[in-house]
């Protein structure tokens, strides 16, 4: 097996872009085809040829345009990567620009970024762009493919900024590193073949990762199928009973010395969703290794929150099962009991996510958190409603729901509020023989129905549900900081929410 993915080291320096020692210098370019400060000295060093050279390379000066320019000795570095940043770049523009630029760097060992860094947020966005845009998943590459992949990764990236010694900026860099590590871990777990990431293997990977981090205050607990039975987790057991790979529930807790809030997270961890006896058509199964993205996100975000030492207690629960058809599989018509006793009439074994989440939500509420958020690749209906780049957020608390949308905007992720309507609530309660009906009898409002179902398990706890079915997996091409395959979508929002809870003084 090829070596583990290595991210470049990231440091700050106040060196001058034109004279810094690096193989490649990345500069931001405005609509006037001039490099913007602190890289203005770079375009000046080229004399009058900078703009015309960019034009000859097809660079028009629009946001996100990229051109690779050999410097022929005009500055110390051999290559300039020019990236369009527009008039007055936002943090999200800078993140995208940094990501696009790193993808244009090949066979370089050292890269210096000279993008504009007005404040700590700008440094954080650029650092995230470098680490997220440079992501590759090479676990399954062998021989010369593996060598080529390794050569294309820079060893060291320096961000040039006059704030290099500013404590706030240094903290922003550390936050970016921890967040990007969490996003990239989530991507790795999602991209791993489902045969290699069974529930037990996923649980082991979480245990090993937390151990390798060795962060103070973090604890991992794994429940196997016997313990799940003892703990009355009928949803996870029901969904997992058709697979030869038994289910697991993983709890990752982080207890800081003086917590100012307690955040509980629950993630859907279906390591492969075949649909079960309500079998999916083959083509729809192709991407269903991504159905554990919610679990990966909540675990990775928790480790990042701990790494950052935020004063927020976190209880993360990952409900892991493989949804398979077999002689032992759960059947449409079965009635199962979720932890806490609520009974559910199963209509469609492909609506499995809500069943494993229900146990996780009940368990999470037992920890009495201030805020509870679940993350799940839950419904195709959310994709139909919001497309492939926007996730839905539904909640029993409008303020929490709107706050999540706001946090997501600030970290460069796209969430949109959806309602939980009376219409779907009454349908959830329309089972002929059990407390709840699992599956929407009509497909209309499928994302809302699923949220209404989940709400039954959170009691009075402030709760929000993130349906990331669309953006968790990018089956089209890579763009900006988002690669093809697993995206790690929601991790930045979860870390951002914890940062906000840490700052709040009410
Ligand atoms: N894991 C799927 C949802 C999904 C679909 C995620 C596409 C990512 C991409 C979920 O378990 C599922 O199968 N949902 C069904 C629910 C239906 C049977 C009520 C769906 O959306 O079709
Ligand atoms: Mn399903
Ligand atoms: Zn699923």
Image: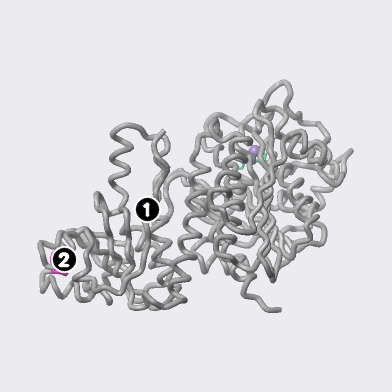
- The colour mode here is one colour
Residue 468 location (% of width, % of height): 58, 51
Q: What secondary structure is the magenta-colored segment mainly?
A: helix
Nearer-the-camera pick, 96 or 494: 494
Q: Which of marks 2 and 1 is in front?
A: 2
Residue 405 location (% of width, % of height): 59, 66
Q: Quadrant of ligand 1?
A: top right
Instruction: Answer few, some or many: residues within 10 Å of disc 1's Cα (few below 14, many 20 plus, some between 14 and 19).
Output: many
Magenta extent: 50-55
Residue 324 location (% of width, % of height): 65, 29
Nearer-the-camera pick, 144 or 417: 144
Q: Residue 134 carries which label?
A: 1
Q: Classify residue 87 as left or right of residue 44.
A: right
Q: What residue sits 58% from the left and 49% below the top?
A: 210
**Residue 52 forms part of the magenta stretch:** yes
386 shown above or below 196: below
Q: What residue sits 21% from the left and 62% below the top?
A: 80
Q: Earlier in the sequence, mark 2 or mark 1?
A: 2
Nearer-the-camera pick, 116 or 349: 116
Q: In which quarter of the image is residue 164?
A: bottom left
6 shown above or below 174: above
Q: Quadrant of residue 16?
A: bottom left
Q: What residue sits 82% from the left and 52% below the top?
A: 426
Pointer 2 residue? 76
280 shown above or below 105: above
Q: Classify residue 239 as left or right of residue 76.
A: right
SS at circle 1: loop
SS at circle 2: loop
Instruction: Answer few, some or many: residues within 10 Å of disc 2's Cα (few below 14, many 20 plus, some between 14 and 19).
Output: some
423 shown above or below 161: above
Q: Which mark is residue 86?
A: none
């Amino acid at each position: 097996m090829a070596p583990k993915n290595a991210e470049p080291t990231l440091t700050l320096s106040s060196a001058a872009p034109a004279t810094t020692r690096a193989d490649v210098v990345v500069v931001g370019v405005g609509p006037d085809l001039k490099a913007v400060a602190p890289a203005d000295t770079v375009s000046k060093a080229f004399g009058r040829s900078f703009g015309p050279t960019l034009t000859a390379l097809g660079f028009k000066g629009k946001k996100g345009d990229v051109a690779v320019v050999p410097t022929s000795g005009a500055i110390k570095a051999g290559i300039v990567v020019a990236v369009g940043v527009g008039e007055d770049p936002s943090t999200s523009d800078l993140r995208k620009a940094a990501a696009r630029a790193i993808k244009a760097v090949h066979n370089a060992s050292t890269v210096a970024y000279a993008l504009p860094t007005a404040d700590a947020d700008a440094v954080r966005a650029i650092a995230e762009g470098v680490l997220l845009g440079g992501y590759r998943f090479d676990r399954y590459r062998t021989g010369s493919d593996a060598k080529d992949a390794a050569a294309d990764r820079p060893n060291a990236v320096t961000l040039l900024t006059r704030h290099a010694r500013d404590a706030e900026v240094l903290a922003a860099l550390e936050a970016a590193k921890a967040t990007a590590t969490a996003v990239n871990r989530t991507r790795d777990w999602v991209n791993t073949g489902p045969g290699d990431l069974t529930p037990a293997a996923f649980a082991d990977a979480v245990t090993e990762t937390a151990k390798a981090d060795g962060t103070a205050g973090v604890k991992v607990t794994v429940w196997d199928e016997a313990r799940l039975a003892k703990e009355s987790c009928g949803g996870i057991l029901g969904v997992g009973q058709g697979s030869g790979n038994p289910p697991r529930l993983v709890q990752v807790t982080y207890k800081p010395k003086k917590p100012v809030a307690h955040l509980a997270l629950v993630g859907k961890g279906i390591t492969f969703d075949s649909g079960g006896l309500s079998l999916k058509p083959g083509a729809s199964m192709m991407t269903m290794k991504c159905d554990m993205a919610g679990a990966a996100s909540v675990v990775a975000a928790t480790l990042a929150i701990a790494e950052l030492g935020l004063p927020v207690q976190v209880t993360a629960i990952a409900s892991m099962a493989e949804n398979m058809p077999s002689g032992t599989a759960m059947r449409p018509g079965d009635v199962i009991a979720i932890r806490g006793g609520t009974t559910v009439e199963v209509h469609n074994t492909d609506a499995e996510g809500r069943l494993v989440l229900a146990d996780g939500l009940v368990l999470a509420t037992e920890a009495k958190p201030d805020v509870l958020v679940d993350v799940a690749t839950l419904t195709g209906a959310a994709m139909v409603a919001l497309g492939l780049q926007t996730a839905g957020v539904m909640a029993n608390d409008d303020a929490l729901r709107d706050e999540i949308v706001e946090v997501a905007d600030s970290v460069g992720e796209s969430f949109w509020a959806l309602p939980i309507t009376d219409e779907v609530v009454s349908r959830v309660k329309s089972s002929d023989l059990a407390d709840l009906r699992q599956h929407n009898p009509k497909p209309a409002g499928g994302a809302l129905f699923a949220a209404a179902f989940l709400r039954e398990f959170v009691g009075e706890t402030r709760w929000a549900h993130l349906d990331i079915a669309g953006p968790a997996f990018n089956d089209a091409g890579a763009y900006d900081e988002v690669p093809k395959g697993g995206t790690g979508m929601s991790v930045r929002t979860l870390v951002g929410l914890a940062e906000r809870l840490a700052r709040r003084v009410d």
